[in-house]
Image (tube, grey):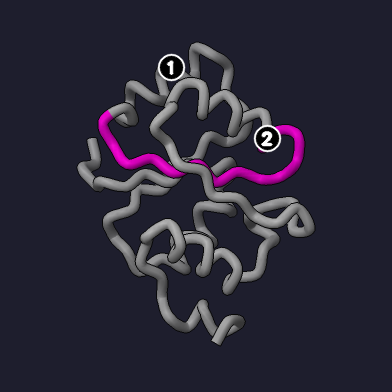
Amino acid sequence: MDEQSKVLIVEGKQDRLKIKRILEDDDVQILCTFGTLGIDALENFVDEYNLFDRDVFIFTDTDEPGVNLRKMLNQELSHARNIYIDKKYREVEDAPDYVLASLLQAANMKVKVEYLKGFL
């Protein structure tokens, strides 16, 4: 198992790729659920990555599947912190890089400074 202290849970592979490109912090493990998980799959996911003992962040889309996944994850992982994108972007992968960078930075994750240019 990977021993990175922070875990960022996203829905899809494109979300993970985009965020991985923005993060400078190698201490963040980005996990994909590949959509909404059933109860058994969710329990296996939590156990497999030892999520009860780690610093967990949930970053899902604002559409119905994303909201449902967030609710399920929050029920299972009450210690997790949530990161939200503005509803106008709907999906994490569609949000501008500088928006994602600022949200990740606000969650105390190191981001590459060039991705904050929209705010500088």
Tell me: 20 left or right of 18: left
- Identify the magenta region: 53-66
20 magenta-colored = no
Residue 109 lies, in percent from the top left, at 37, 61
Of all residues, the one furthest to the bottom in this rendering is: 120
Tell me: 94 left or right of 72: right
User: Compared with residue 55, is residue 50 higher up or lower down, i.e. above or below?
Assistant: above
Q: Nearer the viewer, mark 1 or mark 2?
A: 2
Mark seen at residue 84: none
Residue at figure coordinates x 39%, y 32% from the top left: 79
Residue at figure coordinates x 43%, y 27% from the top left: 77
Tell me: 88 left or right of 51: right
Quarter assignment of residue 93? bottom right
Residue at figure coordinates x 23%, y 35% from the top left: 1
User: Compared with residue 75, is residue 64 higher up or lower down, i.e. above or below?
Assistant: below
Q: Nearer the viewer, residue 96 or 88?
A: 88
How many marks do you count on the picture? 2
Q: Quadrant of the C terminus?
A: bottom right
Upstream in the sequence, badge 1 or badge 2? 1
Task: Please name the residue that numbered disc 1 is placed on.
Answer: 43
Mark seen at residue 67: 2
61 magenta-colored = yes
Residue at figure coordinates x 33%, y 25% from the top left: 48
